[in-house]
Image: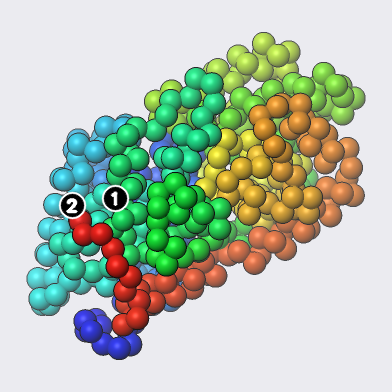
Amino acid sequence: MAKRGESQRRVERVAVISMHTCPLDQPGTGDSGGMNVAVRSMASRMAELGVQVDLFTRAAGPEQHIDNVDPGVRVVHLDAGPHEPVDKEDLPRYLWSFLCGLLRFEADEAHRMGVDEPIYDLVHSHYWLSGWAGRLARDRLGVPLVHSFHTLGAVKNRALGPGDSPESPLRIRGEEKIVQTADRLIAPTEIEAADLTSLYGACPDRIRIVSPGVDTDRFRPGVPGAAKAALGLEDRRIALFVGRLQPLKRPDLAVRAIADLARRRPDLARDVTLVVVGGPSGRGGTSPASLRELAASLGIAGAVEVRDPVQHSMLPDYYRAADVVIMPSTTESFGLVALEAQACGTPVVASDAGGLRAAVRDGTTGLLVSGPDPGDYARAIEALLDDAPRRSMMGAAAARHARGLDWRRAAAGMLDVYEEILSPAGAVATTPVT
């Protein structure tokens, strides 16, 4: 283990906090989504670079303890609240228990290793709940804190639609304190970096941009016909929605877009099926039944198929089977689904919002749509389905684009941030923990 104060610091061990959702959970339902993929993938690639990573999450079942998931990567389930899933909105009451569990684990490991200093070189927290624990762990352990928000409450509140519930003042205050306290803030794009400075007053000197990645060994182009056959989707053109079913992701807008396409271009839409892969998420989430009811009310019941979430390893076949992937989210910090789809050679029709502007190259790897008008999405989908050569050209460009954004590149960029912060010149003034 590196000694404190050396001029050259090699990062050897990192504590990563993902309190509210376990990196091992299946994405697409509950609170599990792109962040789970990002945390697990980054840890695995970081371990390949020689960094030991402990991922701390809340125990949601009595059988959970410590999982050695990859060489150099452990998932540590801490007792904090009941051994069962807890709504994200109720988790703040268990933050102290979670923090105490983390500190006990660290102390026990230090004792086992026979060292009298913190075993971690730094703490990296994900999402605001984890950041609350992370900023206090930073103070108790005396090591730097790196934080990734994944979503920002103020950005979500700015993008609220009719009937949407705003993020709580508790979350906004928590995010403000993390911004003041963290030694480095990781933003996936220049867009989020600008939001951190303009909405939260973040110090630009403490923001670093590290874009998420994609597993290009797994997500790569294949044979669309074979993928469709494997999924029982033969003889159909597929518009695909992948993600948690919640208002923010707007799966209803995808359904309305297909209905609009069917009204205007029945010749084109007669063999088009919208396949939705995902489950309900959080309070007020969208149910599969409500999407089916919406499709029936719009006269396209036979054109919408809602499927349960699938293992992440099964998603490449869905992306390869799709002629177009739809991402109509109100806002996205980045949009890993868009990157995964493009890696498989499938163009994306996405909202012109947040990180999707960086994930999708408008007019080259997909099309960006401004506003929530289903007709605009329908026209974008129509433009791709109606022009096979253009769709093929975009798919090839999408795969090339994604190959430059794999997790190995992302991990190397994150390690650069870690090493910078541990260098003698890496310190930037922060606000003390209160």
Amino acid at the residue labelled 2: Thr
Residue 321: percent from left, percent from top: 72, 43
For the N terminus, the quadrant is bottom left
Can you identify the residue that label 1 sits on?
Answer: 177
Residue 120 placement, left or right of 306: left
Residue furthest bottom in the image: 7
- How far is disc 1 from disc 2 in space, using C-alphas? 8 Å
Q: Amino acid at mark 1?
A: Lys
Any mark on residue 214, and which?
A: none
Q: Secondary structure at mark 2?
A: loop
Looking at the image, which residue is at 84% across and 54% down?
A: 393
Residue that numbered label 2 is attached to? 434
Image check: 180 left or right of 330?
Answer: left
Residue at horizontal 32 percent and vertical 77 percent from the top: 422
CB contact under 8 Å: marks 1 and 2: yes
- Residue 391 lies, in percent from the top left, at 83, 47
Residue at image location 28% in from the left, 63% down from the top: 430
The x and y percentages for residue 98 are: 19, 48
The quadrant in which residue 307 appears is top right
Crowd around label 1: few <14 · some 14–19 · many ≥20 (10 Å) = many
Seen at 78% across and 36% down, the residue is: 381
